[in-house]
Image (cartoon, rainbow, N blue to C red):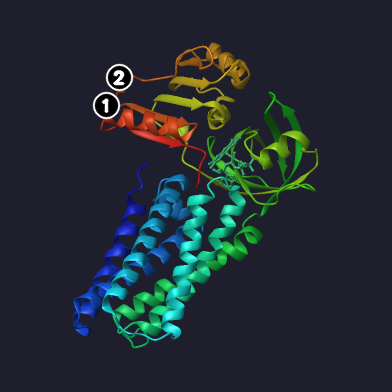
Amino acid sequence: MKNTRGILLIVITTLVSFLLWFFAAQAQLADPLDRARHIVAGLALNGFFLNFLLATRNKTLEKWFAGLDKLYISHKFIGLGTIALLFVHVVLSDQLKTSDAVNIRVVTGGLAMFLLVVLIGITLFARNLPYEKWRLTHRVMLPLYIIALLHVNLSSHISLLKFSLLSVWVWLTVVIGILSAVYVIFFYQKTSFKNKGKVSNVTKLSSNVLEWEITLTKPINYRKGQFIFIKVFQKGFETAPHPFSISGGDEKKILLTTKVSGDFTRQLYDSLELNTEVAIEGPYGFMDFSHGKKKQLWVAGGIGITPFIAYLREDHPDQQIDMYYSYMGPEAGIYKEAIEEYQKRNKSFQVHFIDTSVMPFLTFDGYSLTSDTDVFMCGPEKMIKSYAEYFRKNNKNARLTYEAFKLR
Ligand SMILES: Cc1cc2nc3c(=O)[nH]c(=O)nc-3n(C[C@H](O)[C@H](O)[C@H](O)COP(=O)(O)OP(=O)(O)OC[C@H]3O[C@@H](n4cnc5c(N)ncnc54)[C@H](O)[C@@H]3O)c2cc1C
């Protein structure tokens, strides 16, 4: 699936912003530096609007970007672009030497810059900050946006309070941007987790992988390969939602298979209790094997086996699947026996196990990917990206669908 519509959304809104600010600046401002300063600020405001909108995890937007992971990649680059624009704006403002005494314009501009520098500092120097704490720091974006808006209204030589195409556009994006931010910060977690359930079974599959079953109060409509966000209401557990692929089950009972990778997954593994209440949101994701081509190549790395195993719990004799499952050490090869069983039953399914503790890393050198094959991959980001690059280089028409278990 391609993210063309998502990219178009970014390009079109940026172009509209650029053109409206450009023509307004051309008509109303004499100094070219001053014009550039206004256009750059206008583009930065558009960046804020887009990023708040993308953060809503709206299902239509997910479709337009061909997955939440790709959507968050755009989100990251828009954020970086917006920060760069704000710095350019400050440099241009300095060069204009407008001899502003310390007044509300200077204060709002300075405050916005201060918050921005704090955010950049956190992003650059606190890479190991737990995900949830890092996400909380992102809330600074809303006050930053509001201060930036105040600053624009106070210092712009182009009035946004008079009716014009530009002012309609700016206020429309501001309203959507602020509503999106308010929803994400104050309402998303309270209103989106409507489907409740209870933990009805817990099985330890290895020394760090847990399979847990959830019985839902109302059925969930999902495709095998998709993922959900889940909140677990057990005393002492982190309350923030976490994303996990559905690794099996039906509409009323779903299975999740989680590997210890930090505090929350450690809590799950060590002490998740039966009957613990949970709430889920979703499903999301485009690992849709049933709608793929008849011929498929699957690549799973470690815990990235989960979306595949959900699909392999039922037989699909009509599909020709070539699977590569890479893991480190025999214990990490969870579901190996189940996959071998599936292979015995389904002659058109072939699996290759790559235990990297005793075998070289998996490469696809010499593998000829034909255009009638759909590729699905799930695993560590580095591994998936390098295979994706390789497949694209070797076959321009390759249809790749992948998930790297990362939304940051
Ligand atoms: C689409 C998707 C599907 C996933 N499916 C599975 C699965 O089937 N099995 C499995 O074991 N793991 C899966 N993961 C990874 C899992 O979400 C993280 O390992 C888990 O949230 C880590 O939480 P933690 O507190 O234990 O570790 P932390 O140390 O807090 O986090 C480790 C990393 O996990 C990610 N992460 C943590 N919290 C969140 C969050 N709330 N939202 C988004 N990302 C977060 C971040 O990249 C972070 O750097 C999936 C991730 C994604 C994005």
Q: Residue 394 placed where, x, y %? A: 27, 26
Image quadrant holding the N terminus, namely top left
Question: Does dot 1 land on a helix, a strand or a loop?
Answer: helix
The picture quadrant where one finds residue 273 is: top right
In the image, which disc is placed on residue 368?
A: 2
Neighbourhood count class around disc 1 (C-alpha, 10 Å): few under 14, some 14–19, many 20 upward: some
Residue reaching furthest bottom?
A: 162
Left or right: 288, with 337 as reference point: left
The residue that label 1 is drawn on is 394
Q: How many marks?
A: 2
Q: Residue at x 49, y 70 (%)?
A: 144
From the viewer's perspective, is residue 73 above or below residue 399? below
Up the image or down, 45 lies above or below 127; here it is below
User: Which quadrant of the picture is home to ligand 1?
Assistant: top right
Give, as a three-letter code, the residue at label 2. Ser
Tell me, yes or no, whether the two marked residues, 2 and 1, touch with CB atoms within 8 Å.
Answer: yes
Res 57 seen here: no
89 displayed left or right of 231:
left
Answer with the quarter of the image where residue 160 lies.
Answer: bottom left
Specify whether residue 187 is in view: yes
Sequence-first disc among 2 and 1: 2
From the viewer's perspective, is residue 136 above or below residue 297? below
Q: CA distance from mark 2 to mark 1?
A: 8 Å
Task: Specify the amino acid type for callout 1.
Answer: Asn
Q: Nearer the viewer, residue 348 or 160?
A: 160
Q: Report the residue at 50% width, 26% height from top.
A: 301
